[in-house]
Image (cartoon, rainbow, N blue to C red):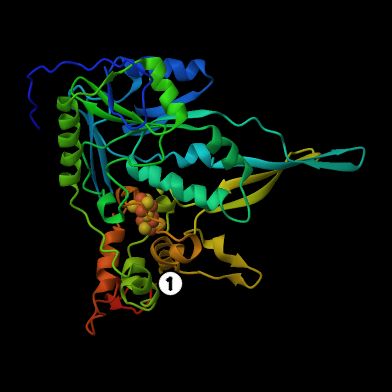
Amino acid sequence: MPTFSTKSQPVKPVNQQPSMSTSYRIPKSDLQRLIELLRCDGYTVVGPKVEDDAIVYAEIGHIDELPKGFRNSQDPGKYRVEQTGHKNLFEFNVGPHSWKQFLFPPRAMVASGTREANRWTFETPPEQQPKFAFLGVRSCELAAIAIQDRIFLQGSYVDPIYKARRESALIIAINCTVAASTCFCTSMKTGPKCRIGYDLALTELEDGFVIQSETERGRSLLTTLKPDEAIDKDLEEARILEQRAVEQISKQLDTTNIRDLLLGNLEHPRWDEVSTRCLSCTNCTMVCPTCFCSSVSEVVDLTGDSVHRQREWDSCFNLDFSYTANGIVRNDRRSRYRQWLTHKLASWYDQFDSSGCVGCGRCITWCPVGIDLTEEVAAIRQPPSSNRMLPVIALPNATCVLTKETKE
Ligand code: SF4
Ligand code: SF4
């Protein structure tokens, strides 16, 4: 644990309106005041809490619901949370949830039709979208929200559900002070320090928070909280804690020329190898904060008098996701994994002018067989070996044989 000087320094009282360029300090109890202010203002406050042995994002009304004292350990295919008894509220990393589920809901009704007197009427239901305040958004997650903004708001089609939720959402970010072994935000230049895209940003100290605002909404909340200006000791403590997270990040993704590397190696034998491990379960796409694929289906009631058009998250790992008039385009796991990785890290640049990966590590942790995209890219950087190992499959009543491709 880092140590800090306990020498007391005078608190600088705030005798004017808080400014966006200044850091302030609040006691931990003020987080409860902040939650109450937001709830009074009509926000549904969503933050981290422990449920089903994981730290997930859910509505919270009190700071007692935050994961105080919890830590997580993460590795490829492994996730554990444990209560260690420390006093901090945010000393863990991202879990299976992301903010995507609140801005781009997993299931949404996009149209409905009703039959009356042999006449059908269709409408887009005028649904009131919730007004969220997100508490505890990490730097990589701010980057993921910025990527989804580009997808849903800045193309030729603007998604009305995302737009309504995004415009009303208030973001309270938290700087990471620890890192999981699956984090690689430093490689993707998305963290761990929160730089843009928040209303308020916090760094959790031993006995309070350093807090900054970046928007007028954030500044106005600070005005109500009447914080003291942070003193040098607070800023030094915050700096040391933030640096601890940087130093704990061990995973790296070499992004040098990554677009051309992947698109220039579409026949690399590593795609065969990874296809023998990938289960095509879709977990990586479901937990990824930037994946945005969906499909629509018609849901008819039993009377046949009403129908809903429903949009649901979908995944490029699903067999029928690439179904076209001529059949399924990506009919083996090799092509589906390759599609996912080359889109995320290569053709995303052509489509959205950025990587589709923010280095959060969720797809590594939540892959049931522990496939790690950083290892896959590193393997593709190696020239194909002439003596490559081929996958082994067992046939009934036969010895093991080597096969060039494993078909489903
Ligand atoms: S690809 Fe994996 S590491 Fe990258 S943003 Fe998605 S879940 Fe996170
Ligand atoms: S890479 Fe892992 S998480 Fe993704 S589909 Fe394959 S087995 Fe599932």
Q: Residue at x 28, y 41 (%)?
A: 193
Asked whether mark 1 and ligand 2 are closer than 8 Å, the reply comes as no
Q: Is residue 395 visible?
A: no
Q: Residue at x 25, y 70 (%)?
A: 379
Q: Which residue is mark 1?
A: 407
Classify 10 Å Cα crowding around label 1: few (below 14), some (14-19), many (20 and above). Answer: few
Could you say which is closer to the camera, residue 60 or residue 134? Answer: 134
Could you say which is closer to the camera, residue 224 or residue 318? Answer: 224
Q: Residue at x 35, y 51 (%)?
A: 358
Q: Position of residue 306 (x, y in %)?
A: 78, 39
Q: Is residue 313 above or below residue 371?
A: above
Most extreme residue toward the right is: 117
Q: Quadrant of the C terminus?
A: bottom left
Q: Is residue 340 above or below residue 87?
A: below
Could you say which is closer to the camera, residue 273 or residue 286? Answer: 286
Q: Position of residue 334 (x, y in %)?
A: 41, 69
Element marked by disc 1: loop
Q: Residue at x 33, y 77 (%)?
A: 268
Most extreme residue toward the bottom is: 386
Q: Amino acid at mark 1?
A: Lys
Q: Position of residue 308 (x, y in %)?
A: 71, 42
